Image (tube, rainbow, N blue to C red):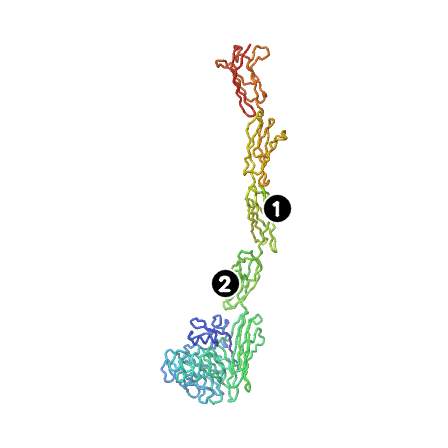
């Protein structure tokens, strides 16, 4: 027998209102169910919250057939409420009643007998030949009734909170749905949802080779009150299976009387109702011989026919096979010719037989992969039931990106160049890992074209994960480069000295694996330079100077460093002095020198510029004096130093020793033309020194009798401008002379006697 089904592992369920539900058949699932933390109407989803496992797409066995993606067929207007006897239309709510005889428009082969009609019984079964309303189930086999029982227990739909029983008949199959029904007596605190399909064995409503299907939704109770149950559990167990009615041939899946997931095989006791949740069973009951071996029953969760698996994803799946006859052992196996990437995780023989496997989506298995899961019993002759898993592996989007190397501290912009696969839909999400854990939360981004700042140079492994609209993910890993920053270093030939301090600088900067091609200096004194090794940088003012150097590599990465107070210009004294008196003549050539240097020097060295004085031409006094021995221009020089003779400074000032005018004036003269003392005239020591000259002669009454501005023209005893001789008498002279060198004016007033 071959069934076209799909098996999925690690299913999780979600309530309709969005509450997270743990995977079925786990203790956590059962605890939440018993605590009433979710309601009916559960959908099979995967761990990502998708309504079908691992991004499934449906590919039905035949276009016209109902979709096999969910074995529970939705009740629509093609269904009718089962018209139970003693029920009232339109709902026909009842307890323990059966439908009228229902004719089947197809042949249903049941143990070699073509059944063409049946009865639908409220208590979770259909019967052939006679209606059967017994509410307490008995284990199979029994010769009381010919029955197919997806869940034989005491169903009670009289409470309005209970659902109803629906059916649908087509030319090839019949569906009966007990939709969220309560239990006796009119309890609805727990509800069961289950379904039966019987077919002609050809209609694609069921997988090829099957003519019966049991399908389960959320199952919450096992037993009614009249069957000695309490709160829906205990008492007479509910029975799931098929009974030929001869007391010999039957098929039993289990008997259920408690909550939970417990299950010990078709013929064990005390099975938990939650074990049935969201399971589906396919089997064939057309076996014609009463002694023939029945094939194993395949049990799988409700999933889709064809899965779409993205390259890089892993799809786990499992299948169980029940041995319908006592004492049999079934062995599960997987056959997948030509399929790569399939791994069998575990396989356990027994009743049931279980096999767990997984398929890894790989480029080598892109396309449709057909995997056959089979269960073979040890009956005589051995029977095999097979299920076909069809998994389509599709390539995900092509993840790729580009960027440009940057320097540390600069943002690196990433450009997404990913390509969506045709038919997959557009890329919808991006996940970036910049390979920079020290950046913390900034190491990740979900933007399409983000930027990231690396603070350290090097090569970083960047991962881009893109996901398209159907959920396929692809990663691209690439190395990005952050150029190294130069390490700035420099020195100078001198760091300290007196002003002017002229310095030569040397660049010692390096950059790993590259070269430096640009320099920018700031010397701290207002001067800059762009050469690698600037020279003769002079500091004229005392103080401390911070030097800054910025270097740039050929990749454009710049680093700056500075040395605080690298250059120290020592505060030496500024030489200065005054000298005097000035002007001065040779008559009194003593010059005083007064030091005015600041701050006060620690030493003074004077050179008076008087080379004729071999002894006293120099001095180390702060305020010396010097006697110059001759007229002329002299330049005196002062050299001062700071502490310990540092920072010498020089000042030169010039002075002049001028000739002096010495005047001799006679007090009498004899203007008698004898050639001796005929004129009155002052005599100068050096007439060339005379610049301005004026001589006035007055008589005793104050009358001006003579005037001259010529130092060589004397008074001849006559009234000026005439030949009249003055009388013999005493006259007053007034002589004024100006030194042409120093501008000194000399005034002489006295008496002169005219004698004949």
* Total number of numbered discs in the rendering: 2
For the C terminus, the image quarter is top right
Question: Compared with residue 710, is residue 550 higher up or lower down, i.e. above or below?
Answer: below
Q: Which residue is mark 2?
A: 446
Name the residue nearer the viewer: 165 or 558: 558
Question: Compared with residue 557, is residue 569 higher up or lower down, i.e. above or below?
Answer: above
At horizontal 51% and vertical 66% (from top left) the residue drawn is: 467
Name the residue nearer the viewer: 481 or 564: 564
Q: Which residue is mark 1?
A: 493
Does any portion of residue 168 appear in the rendered image?
A: no
How far apart in space, not on screen, are marks 1 and 2 (Cα)? Answer: 55 Å
Question: Compared with residue 148, is residue 402 higher up or lower down, i.e. above or below?
Answer: above
Hey, which quadrant is residue 357 in on the image?
bottom right
Residue 9 percent location from the top left of the image: 51, 75
Per the rendering, the mark at residue 428 is: none
At horizontal 54% and vertical 24% (from top left) the residue drawn is: 744
Q: Earlier in the sequence, mark 1 or mark 2?
A: 2
Hey, which quadrant is residue 499 in on the image?
top right
Residue 168 percent location from the top left of the image: 43, 80
Mark 1 surroundings: few (<14), some (14-19) or many (≥20) residues within 10 A: few
């Amino acid at each position: 027998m071959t069934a076209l089904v799909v098996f999925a592992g690690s299913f999780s369920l979600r309530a309709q209102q969005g509450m997270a539900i743990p995977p079925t058949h786990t203790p956590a699932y059962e605890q939440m169910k018993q605590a009433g933390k979710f309601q009916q109407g559960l959908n099979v989803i995967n761990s990502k919250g998708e309504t079908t496992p691992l991004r499934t797409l449906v590919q039905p066995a035949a276009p016209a057939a109902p979709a096999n993606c969910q074995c529970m067929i939705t009740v629509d207007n093609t269904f009718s409420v089962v018209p139970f006897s003693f029920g009232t239309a339109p709902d026909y709510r009842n307890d323990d009643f059966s439908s009228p005889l229902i004719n089947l428009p197809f042949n249903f082969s049941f143990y070699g007998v073509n059944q063409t009609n049946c009865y639908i019984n409220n208590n979770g079964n259909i019967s052939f030949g006679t209606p059967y309303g017994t509410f307490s189930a008995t284990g199979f086999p029994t010769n009381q009734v010919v029955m197919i029982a997806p869940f034989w227990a005491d169903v009670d739909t009289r409470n309005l909170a209970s659902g109803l029983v629906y059916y649908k008949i087509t030319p090839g199959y019949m569906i009966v749905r007990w939709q969220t029904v309560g239990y006796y007596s009119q309890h609805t605190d727990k509800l069961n949802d289950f379904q039966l399909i019987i077919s002609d064995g050809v209609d694609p409503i069921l997988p090829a080779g099957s003519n019966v299907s049991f399908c389960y939704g959320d199952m919450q109770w096992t037993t009614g009150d009249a069957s000695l149950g309490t709160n829906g559990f205990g008492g007479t167990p509910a029975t799931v299976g098929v009974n030929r009615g001869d007391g010999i041939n039957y098929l039993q899946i289990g008997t259920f009387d408690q909550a939970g997931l417990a299950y010990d095989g078709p013929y064990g006791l005390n099975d938990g109702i939650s074990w049935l949740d969201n399971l589906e069973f396919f089997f064939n009951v057309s076996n014609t011989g009463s002694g023939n071996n029945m094939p194993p029953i395949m049990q799988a969760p409700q999933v889709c026919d064809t899965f779409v698996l993205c390259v890089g994803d892993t799809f786990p799946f499992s299948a169980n096979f029940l041995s319908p006859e006592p004492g049999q052992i079934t062995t599960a196996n997987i056959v997948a010719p030509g399929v790569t990437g399939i791994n069998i995780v575990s396989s356990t023989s027994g009743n049931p037989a279980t096999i767990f496997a997984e398929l890894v989506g790989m480029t080598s298995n892109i396309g449709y992969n057909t995997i056959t899961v089979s269960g073979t019993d040890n009956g005589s002759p051995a029977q095999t039931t097979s299920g076909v898993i069809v998994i389509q592996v599709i390539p995900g989007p092509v993840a790729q990106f580009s960027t440009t190397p940057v320097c540390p501290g600069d943002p690196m912009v990433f450009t997404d160049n990913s390509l969506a696969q045709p038919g997959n839909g557009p890329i919808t999400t991006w996940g970036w890992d910049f390979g920079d854990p020290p950046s913390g939360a900034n190491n990740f981004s979900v933007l399409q074209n983000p930027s990231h700042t690396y603070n350290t140079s090097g090569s970083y492994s960047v991962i881009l994960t893109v996901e398209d609209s159907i959920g396929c993910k692809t990663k691209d890993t690439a190395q990005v480069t952050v150029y190294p920053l130069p390490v700035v270093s420099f020195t100078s030939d001198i760091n300290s000295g007196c002003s002017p301090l002229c310095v030569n600088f040397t660049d010692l900067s390096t950059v790993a694996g590259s070269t430096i091609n640009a320099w920018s200096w700031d010397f701290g004194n207002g001067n800059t330079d762009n050469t690698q090794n600037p020279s003769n940088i002079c500091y004229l003012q005392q103080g401390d100077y911070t030097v800054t150097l910025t270097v740039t590599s050929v990749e454009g990465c710049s680093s700056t460093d500075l040395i605080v107070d690298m250059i120290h210009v020592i505060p030496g004294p500024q030489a200065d002095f005054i000298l005097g008196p000035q002007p001065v003549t040779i008559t009194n050539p003593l010059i005083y020198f007064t030091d005015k240097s600041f701050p006060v020097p620690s030493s003074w060295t004077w050179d008076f510029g008087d080379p004729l004085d071999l002894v006293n031409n120099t001095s180390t006094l702060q305020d010396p004096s010097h006697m110059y021995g001759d007229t002329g221009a002299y330049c005196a020089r002062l050299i001062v130093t700071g502490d310990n003779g540092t920072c010498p400074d020089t000042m030169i000032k010039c002075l002049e020793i001028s000739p002096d005018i010495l005047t001799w004036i006679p007090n009498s003269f004899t203007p008698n033309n004898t050639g001796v003392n005929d004129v009155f005239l002052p005599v100068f020591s050096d007439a060339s020194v005379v610049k301005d000259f004026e001589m006035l002669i007055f008589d005793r009454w104050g009358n001006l009798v003579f005037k001259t501005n010529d130092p060589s023209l004397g008074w001849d005893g006559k009234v000026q401008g005439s030949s009249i001789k003055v009388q013999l008498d005493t006259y007053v002279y007034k002589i004024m002379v100006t030194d042409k060198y120093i501008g000194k004016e000399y005034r002489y007033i006295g008496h002169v006697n005219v004698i004949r």
